[in-house]
Amino acid sequence: MSLYTDYLKQIETRKEHGLHPKPIEDADFVEELIAQIKDTDHEHRADSLNFFIYNTLPGTTSAAGVKAKFLKEIILGSSVVEEIAPTFAFELLSHMKGGPSVEVLLDLALGDDPAIATQSADVLKTQLLLYEADMAR
């Protein structure tokens, strides 16, 4: 049994009770989703992409950290996901409102590509969950 199939079962159980799917907060599950997204022929790729974009909890969860790092890969071009252009990856980072995404945004803002640095700085201006370590950097 995989974390993905467990999540699908949980969705069905919650639906029977009139509840929406639980947000995803587990890093291992997000890593499984990313593997399925990267496999363009995977049977669950579309749903995995949807869960990654819309169900992964933002903020300071372990899932948010994995999501932010994958979005960084997309922005830098080391991973290509047709459905997530770099501009959309920045938008997704902006919705995270800080936490682990700030480290990624700082890496990008302090990087060598001026266009990426500018976009990252624009997103950083909107973030709420900044910590002393972020400010020091």
Image (tube, rainbow, N blue to C red):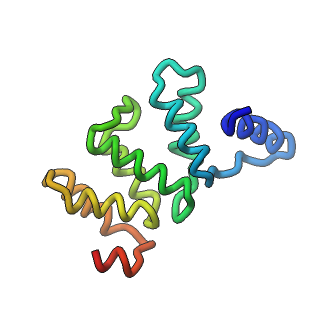
- Residue 3 percent coordinates (x, y): 68, 39
Q: Quadrant of the N terminus?
A: top right
Where residue 29 sits: x, y (%)? Answer: 61, 44
**At 43% across and 66% down in the image, what residue appears?**
98
Residue 25, quarter of picture: bottom right
Residue lying at 86% horizontally and 46% vertically, measured from the top left: 17
Quadrant location of residue 43?
top right
Q: Which residue does the image show at 26% across and 56% down from the upper left?
A: 108
Is 22 on the left-hand or right-hand side of 69? right
Picture layout, residue 53 above or below residue 96: above
Left-right relation of 102 to 20: left
Q: Position of residue 129 (x, y in %)?
A: 45, 72
Asked if residue 1 lies left or right of residue 82, the reply is right
Q: Nearer the viewer, residue 71 or 13?
A: 71
Above-or-below relation of 16 to 90 = above
Q: Nearer the viewer, residue 66 or 119?
A: 66
In the image, residue 22 sits, relative to residue 61, either above or below, namely above
Q: Is residue 79 left or right of residue 43?
A: left
Kindly indicate the quadrant of the structure image that contains residue 102. Answer: bottom left
Residue 94 x %, y %: 39, 58
